[in-house]
Image (spheres, rainbow, N blue to C red):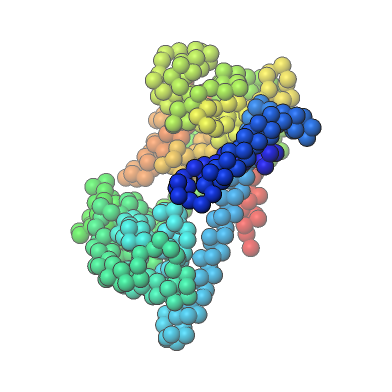
Amino acid sequence: MLAWSGMGGVVTLAAAQPLTVDFAYRSQLVLIAFVVALVTLVVQGGTLPLLIRVLGIRGTDEEAARRGGLRALESAAAGRHAGGMAQQEQGREERDRVLSEYGAWRLRTDEDAPALEEVRTLETLLRLKAERLGSPEVGLWTAALTRELLTEVVPRTVVQPREQLMDMVPVLRRLIDFLVETGRWAPGSMRGAEAPALLHELEFAALEAADDPTRRSFSTNVLGHGLSLGVDLEDEEALADYLHWFHSLPDAERLAVSGTGRLAQPSTPFDPLLERALRRRDEAEEQDWPWFLPALEDDGEPLGELAEQEGVGPYLDCPLVRRAVGVLEVIGEGRRATETGAPGRETTAELLEHLGLGGDARSLWDRPELASVWTTLLDGGWLELADGRVRAAVGPVPAAAPEDAEGFVEFGHALITAALLGRQARGAEDGGFRGMPDTIAALLVACGDEGLRLPPGPELPPPEHEPRALARLLHVMHDLGDLADCGVLTHEEGVFRGGPAVMLALVGLLRRDGEADRTDRP
């Protein structure tokens, strides 16, 4: 087909026309070219439809092509994640191989070289280069990338003694020599003659950046201050002692440490031995039954043998379950989602009206009683965010209406468990529980017949001269207030109340934690 329908003699004619007048046989050549062009255009062009029918060639179905393109896009999207993971794994393998060879090369050049320490330093630099700067190729080192890594990324993320910082640039210089010598210096990198001059300049600039607190994160400043006090950051006990001391400092001093990494004259000097004793004392006190809780009545029935709820009543009484069902009904097949993962303002207003919560809000996050339910549904997998939209999903247990008693009970139990488990798993700064393990004890009391009144009455006075006692109470009140916003608990006239459904989910978590503790024991 291509040969029959191509340009044919037209090209010949175009080539013959530029021949000069005095060129030998020009007239004959132009005539021949004209005849060839005429034949290919008239004969081959005129018979082209017949040839197409004889060969049975069909045109492209536009809709089929579109569907095929969509299938190709879907296949590419499905494989993108797996391909990205494979690429990351390949990058790690290449990094490990290069570092292993570098260690052997270093010992060949200097048998007394601290090869192991150098490999550790280089592993950190290469990992940060790949993860923070998006440059996983071991042999690619541009001037801009090297400068950003040493003067911005490392000071912000790495805590290490000053002598290791001083060794970092010389170690990187030796790696570059190794890459050049073994042919791994990638195209696009800076010129070989440029690297030594740049690293000489950065040797001081990297130390200056490491000493600049504005280039470090808060956590790096705090850990760097501990390092300056002689704390072994790889020793979990020593690190816990230091953080215990840090959290006992006044607010102004904690801000100074987190902002600058320095504290010239702390109100309480750091004494490692004293701080370990104080920390262990406080941890022992936290294991005691909270002073603000009444004693649990022991009816002789183990919590682990609590019977499951068979009726829908306890779950209908739980605001979280009712609100979650309403949210999933409104979201349905999908609604537009904002960049924060919340529905738009119109959908938020619709949710508030549908759930009978009243009022208005610019954002779902402005209404804690709705935001907490939304977060629980996301954590549990009953809502999915993709491509700027949110839609209802199946989750670990499908949502069900009260008419399906068995399904509704299973959904309600899974939902309450997800709300408790999500807060137990997250850190306090991310919306998790602040008062553990006191919060669990408070929940057990709140699920009793009388509920839990907080703050307690005069029958439970706080211990005298114990500031931590008040802090324990405030942390638990914060946690229970959050669960009341979420709808796991109710809070009326100062009394928090759970119920049989909450108690069952709580016992399940306690049983799971107990089994995990037994598994972790040697």
For the view shown, which residue lies furthest in the bottom direction?
111
Q: Quadrant of residue 415?
A: top right
Q: Is residue 278 left or right of residue 378?
A: left
User: How far from the left and from the top, in percent, is residue 439?
Assistant: 49, 38
Q: Quadrant of the N terminus?
A: top right
294 or 92, which is in the foreground?
92
Query: Can residue 92 be seen by looking at this rendering?
Result: yes
Q: Could you say which is closer to the camera, residue 155 or residue 402?
A: 155
Please state if 245 lies on the left or on the right of 297 as rendered. Answer: left
Q: How many marks?
A: 0
* In the image, farthest residue toward the left: 265
Give percent across and percent down for residue 356: 51, 13
Report the residue at 40% width, 61% height from top.
Answer: 188
Nearer to the camera, 477 or 72: 72
The x and y percentages for residue 376 are 54, 32
Q: Quadrant of the C terminus?
A: bottom right
Residue 374 visible? The answer is no
- At x 44%, y 31%, the residue is 339
Q: Where residue 267 sits: x, y (%)?
A: 23, 55
